[in-house]
Image (tube, rainbow, N blue to C red):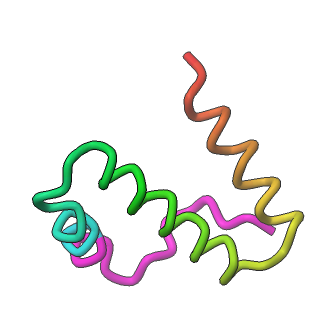
Amino acid sequence: MLKTKPNIANTDEFYASLLAAHEGLDKAESDALNARLILLLANHIGEQDVLDAALVAAQLKGES
């Protein structure tokens, strides 16, 4: 089951780390970093039904 409620112990620390990882990167490098991060986390999750639910949820968030 996809967790959609906040589930990161220290969200501010993670957000700071995420921003720091992107520091100094151009758009293409930043996009590539995001893609690698997505694939690493998807591999960690490893459950197709959870990954499918995440894709659906992400698409719905992008709709106006």
Q: Main secondary structure of the magenta part?
A: loop
Q: Is residue 61 left or right of residue 25?
A: right
Q: Nearer the viewer, residue 11 or 25?
A: 25
Query: Residue 24 at what x, y percent from top left?
Result: 11, 58
Asked if the stretch drawn in magenta spans residue 6, the answer is yes
Q: Considering the image in quadrants, where does the C terminus appear?
A: top right
Q: On the image, which quarter does residue 19 sit in?
A: bottom left
Q: Nearer the viewer, residue 5 or 61?
A: 61
Query: Residue 32 at what x, y percent from top left?
Result: 42, 56
Q: Is residue 25 above or below residue 62?
A: below
Of all residues, the one furthest to the left in this rendering is 24
Q: On the image, which quarter does residue 8 sit in?
A: bottom left
**Which residue is drawn at the image coordinates 31% and 54% (left, top)?**
29
Q: Is residue 32 left or right of residue 28?
A: right
**Which residue is drawn at the image coordinates 78% and 79% (left, top)?**
46
Q: Considering the image in quadrants, where does the N terminus appear?
A: bottom right
- Give the magenta range: 1-14
Query: Residue 38 at what x, y percent from top left?
Result: 55, 64
Q: On the image, which quarter does residue 10 sit in?
A: bottom left
**Which residue is drawn at the image coordinates 22% and 61% (left, top)?**
22
Of all residues, the one furthest to the right in this rendering is 49
Of all residues, the one furthest to the top in this rendering is 64
Q: Nearer the viewer, residue 25 or 62?
A: 25
Q: Is residue 40 above or below residue 27?
A: below
Q: Is residue 20 left or right of residue 40?
A: left
Q: Is residue 32 above or below residue 21?
A: above
